[in-house]
Structure formats: C-alpha cells, structure tokens
Image (cartoon, rainbow, N blue to C red):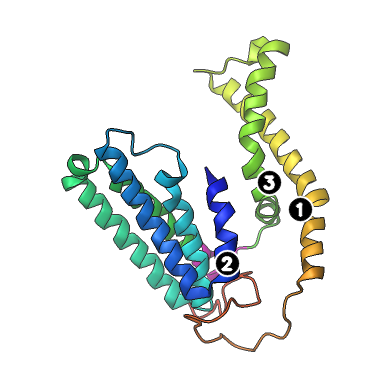
Amino acid sequence: MEEHFYLLWPTCIRRLKLRGTAIVAVAICVAALLCRMIASRMGHNPLGFETWLCADGLGMGALLAVTARMLRQSRLGLWLFAGGALLVSAGCYLLDRIVGHVVADGSFHMTAFNSFCCACVTVTLLLGSRFSIRQRTLGFFGEISYGLYLVHMLCFDFYDHVMPKIWPAISDGHGHFGLIVVRFLMAGTLAVGLSTVSRRYYEDPILRLKNRLAPSEQGKTAGEPAPNPSGDWPADDIGELSNPQSAA
C-alpha cells in the first residue's frame, strides 16, 4: 500500500517548506482516520490494508522526521513531541472505547496504535543518543533495513512455496516451534543476504550518484542550531540528535 504514499511524498519534500510538509503529514493522518470512519459507515471493513485506510502510520513517521528538522533536533522539543503523541494515543483509545466502536467501528484504534508507536520511536531515538548506544550489528541492520523491509515477505513466501516440494518434513511448521525457528532462520538468512547485496551493488551506487549530482552543503555551525519552524529543509541529515549531553 505504500506505493501511493511514496509516489506523492517526494513531491511534497521538493516543493514545500518544512511547515507546509508538516501540515501535509498531519492532513494525511486526519484523512486516513476520516476514510476509516466513512468505510465503517458504508458497511466496509475500516481496518483494511488499502492506502487510504492506513496511511496515517506513514504520515506519523513522516511527521516525526519533519518535526526533528523543524526543531533542529532539539531534545526538549522532541520529548514534547513524544508526549503529545502519547496524549493523542490515549485520547483516541479512550474515545474508541467509549463511542468509537458504536460510531466508527473501532476506527480510532488504529490512530491510537500508530500514535503510540510514533512516541515509542521518538523516545528510542532520544534514549539511544543520550546513552551513546552504538553497536555494529544494529548499524549493519540499519544500513540494509530498507532492502530487508522490501524483500523479507517475498523470502518467506518463497520458503513456504519451495520447501514442501524439496523437503516436506520441515515445511509444515504449524504448532511446531522448532520448525518455526528453522523457517525463520532459513528465510531470514536469505532476506538478509539479498538485502546486503542490494545495499552494496544497487543502493550505494545510486546514493553516490545522488551525492555527485546534488552535493550537500558543507560547513555546519557549532553548537545546537536554533529551531527552524518554517524555513527550507536543512542540508544535513539526522545522523544523531544534537547535544546528547543536555537530555531533558
């Protein structure tokens, strides 16, 4: 379902400033909730996998990335963002428990879940930078994460399709924890291998080409930059949160 989002989002990044992009991200979250409510009133399943029913998860991730840049990675600002996401999650959960199942068939439940996940990701980033959590294994999986995200389901489907034909004894893992572990290890290893090859021989060359065609601006200012609520996109990426010693 992400194809529709990724088809339009790069245009927003290119054409809009930070504040405009944040507004679009919030609009995506609200629109997805409204679509779920409309689907419920029309007698359809509001918790389906169509883009218009679950795009708020993507929208909240995009909003987190935009907010971090608007605040120039301010730790206090991101703690407030995480707190706001938790409040939205709690509010939607209570609303869902009180009237949501009657009015919108649980449509608020997904908003509560996505907001909670957004808060958890934000807190994880803050704590990871505060305590300088650096591990080569995690860094490796971070580098191949996008390719792994794309191919892992294909690898597990490939396993389920091929193994009954070549090794039936270990193909049916329902109710057998050992066979489930074997399936995870074999299909997971295949997914990690393909993702590693993709990163080294496909993604890295494209990223190097991008850097040659559109090099980033050099010369970062010292100290923690001031917030940038409506200006242009900053040239630097979010590698780690600035000033990790000043945890809120």
Q: Which mark is residue 203?
A: 1
Q: Amino acid at mark 3?
A: Gly
- Circle 2 residue: 13
Q: Amino acid at mark 1?
A: Glu
Give the number of the mark in front: 2 or 1.
Answer: 2
In primary-sequence order, the first of circles 1 and 3 is 3
Q: CA distance from mark 1 to mark 3?
A: 9 Å
Q: CA distance from mark 2 to mark 3?
A: 22 Å
Tell me the chief SS of the magenta region: helix
| Magenta region, residue range | 125-133
User: Which quadrant is the C terminus positioned in?
Assistant: bottom left
31 or 93, which lies in front?
Answer: 31
Q: Is residue 117 left or right of residue 167?
A: left
Would you place residue 71 above or below residue 149 in this image?
Answer: below
Q: Which mark is residue 147?
A: 3
Q: CA distance from mark 2 to mark 1?
A: 20 Å
Q: Amino acid at mark 2?
A: Ile
